[in-house]
Every structure is written in structure tokens, then in C-alpha cells.
Image: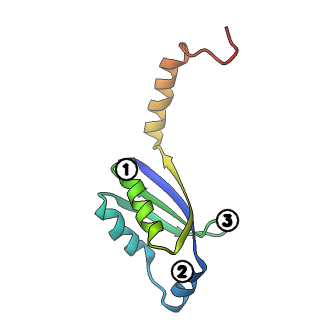
């Protein structure tokens, strides 16, 4: 299954609510993701530009988009940024495939 890394921010209201009633967001996220056929590998509260980072395996782009859209639509989250991640084995395969293609690519302005 593809791996997706998502960073995002909590709204002010969400932060205020979690201060009043702390909860383990890993559990809520895991239930949500499993409904789409995926699994949560990690959830982290982070410092800096984003408030949290998640690592999720999902069956594909459509399921991951559904996970993100439904979570964002429920409120409490903003500025979601998702990146597809490849394992080192997958990356090795991508580099090997690129090597097979490299000889046939003409650079812009090249002969």
C-alpha cells in the first residue's frame, strides 16, 4: 500500500477543545483511516509551522483523498499538506526504471 505523510494545523477552536478535554487523536484517526481500508503508522504532535504529522498507508490516492477530505470537512483542521513516500526498495526500483528511460529523453533545447 502507498504511504502518505500529512502535515496540518489544528484550528484555534480544536486546540481549545483538546485543552479542556484531552484525547488521543491516534485512536480517532486510526478508526477513521481503517474505514477507508488503510492504517495509521504514526501520529505526532509537532513544533513549528505545522501542529501534527501523520504517516498513513492507504490503498490508493482515491482512498487517501477521501480520508483527508472527510477529516477536513468535519472541521478542526486546516492547511493539510500531503506527500507520497516511497520505501528505499521502491526508490531503488524507481532509479532503475529511470536508468532504463534516461537514454530516450531529450532535454529541452537539446539536439
Measure the C-alpha gap from mark 2 to mark 3: 17 Å
Give the image quarter of residue 13.
bottom right
Which residue in the rendered view is the most extreme toward the front? 73
Disc 2 designates what residue? 14
Query: Is 33 positioned to the left or the right of 87 in the image?
Result: left
Give the image quarter of residue 50.
bottom right
Which residue in the rendered view is the most extreme toward the top? 111
Q: Which mark is residue 62?
A: 1
Residue at the image point whose x is 52% and y is 85% from the top: 18
Residue at the image point whose x is 54% and y is 80% from the top: 14
Disc 3 designates what residue? 49
Local packing at callout 1 (Cα closer than 10 Å; few below 14, some 14-19, many 20+) is few
Answer whether residue 57 is visible to the viewer in this image. Answer: no
Q: Please say if 111 is above or below 91.
A: above
Give the mark, 3 or 1, whose residue is nearer the N terminus: 3
Residue at the image point whose x is 44% and y is 61% from the top: 69
Residue at the image point whose x is 29% and y is 57% from the top: 37
Q: Name the front one of labels 3 and 1.
A: 1
Q: Please say if 54 is above or below 99.
A: below
Instruction: Estimate the x, y position of residue 42 in percent, counting from the top left.
Output: 45, 64
Instruction: Estimate the x, y position of residue 72 in percent, counting from the top left.
Output: 48, 67
Looking at the rendered image, the quarter that the C terminus falls into is top right
Give the image quarter of residue 16.
bottom right
Circles 2 and 1: CB atoms closer than 8 Å:
no
Q: Please say if 17 is above or below 88.
A: below
Answer whether residue 29 is visible to the viewer in this image. Answer: yes
Local packing at callout 2 (Cα closer than 10 Å; few below 14, some 14-19, many 20+) is some
Q: Secondary structure at mark 2?
A: helix
Amino acid at each position: 500500500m502507498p504511504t502518505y505523510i500529512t502535515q496540518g494545523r489544528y484550528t484555534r477552536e480544536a486546540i481549545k477543545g483538546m485543552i479542556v478535554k484531552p484525547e488521543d487523536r491516534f485512536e480517532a484517526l486510526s478508526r477513521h483511516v481503517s474505514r477507508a481500508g488503510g492504517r495509521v503508522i504514526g501520529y505526532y504532535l509537532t513544533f513549528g509551522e505545522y501542529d501534527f504529522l501523520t504517516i498513513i498507508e492507504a490503498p490508493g490516492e482515491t482512498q487517501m483523498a477521501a480520508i483527508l477530505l472527510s477529516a477536513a470537512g468535519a472541521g478542526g483542521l486546516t492547511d493539510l499538506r500531503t506527500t507520497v513516500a516511497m520505501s528505499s526498495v521502491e526508490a531503488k526500483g524507481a532509479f532503475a526504471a529511470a536508468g532504463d528511460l534516461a537514454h530516450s529523453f531529450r532535454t529541452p533545447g537539446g539536439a
